[in-house]
Amino acid sequence: MKPYLHSLSALLGALLSAASLAAPPAPQANSCRIQLGGGATVDYGKIKRSLLRAAEAAPLPAQQRSVTVSCEQPATLALRQSAVDGSVSSAAGGRLGLAGETGHGIGLASGKPLGAFALRWRRDAATIDGAPARLIVSSDGGATWRELESDTVISAADLIAWASGAQRRPASGRTLTAGVRIETAIAPTSTLYLGREVQLDGSISLSAVFP
């Protein structure tokens, strides 16, 4: 029988790492920076055993944050996200309602995926230079765009951008903000060997693309 864990140290190290800006033209890219409100690390502290489940994945409390892109000059841009750890627990990903490549791993315990996490973009919390805006998504490199109709998790193949008015294309601005929700779930403890304290470790990078 697999031992149940007594405690779980849950520091999602650098959940959103320092954002890299990689797209031409270089002078424009260097004039913008991406920040996560509340800092780039989400710390769940010690996870109580009572929050975990033997037969099904257990979600952790969602963390509400904001993403801000600040540019020295008005810029038209989109964001792309990528993650390092692809070791996703299918049970944890399913518990979060994730599909395909939208979930990211949070490390391993004795070779088994510890769970999954995702960055969910909120459709109702975007602004451009302080004015209400909309989030739009492209799955074809920016050739076409669609509205974000609900809070959404995007894949590494998607771009997400800000739009204003009735236009369905990226809009220009100096300060662009969006609300995000960081969602995490731990795999069923029956699938894990947790004889010692384990640290969760997952990360997402955001990079700016200038269409």
Image (spheres, rainbow, N blue to C red):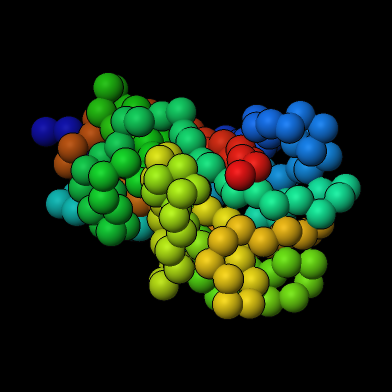
Residue drawn where x is 28% and y is 22% of the image: 110
Q: Compare residues 67 and 76 and report the one nearer the observer.
A: 76
Residue 149 horizontal side relative to residue 210, left or right: left
Residue drawn where x is 73% and y is 32% of the image: 25
Residue 60 horizontal side relative to residue 100, left or right: right
The picture places residue 99, in percent across and down from the top left corner, at 26, 50
Q: Compare residues 206 and 40 and report the one nearer the observer.
A: 206
The picture places residue 95, in percent across and down from the top left corner, at 26, 57
- Answer whether residue 123 is visible to the viewer in this image: yes
- Answer whether residue 188 is visible to the viewer in this image: no
Q: Quadrant of the C terminus?
A: top right
The quadrant where residue 149 appears: bottom left
Residue drawn where x is 57% and y is 36% of the image: 205
The picture places residue 107, in percent across and down from the top left corner, at 39, 30
**Furthest-left residue in view?**
1
Residue drawn where x is 56% and y is 61% of the image: 169
**Furthest-top residue in view?**
111
Q: Quadrant of the N terminus?
A: top left
The picture places residue 186, in percent across and down from the top left corner, at 33, 47
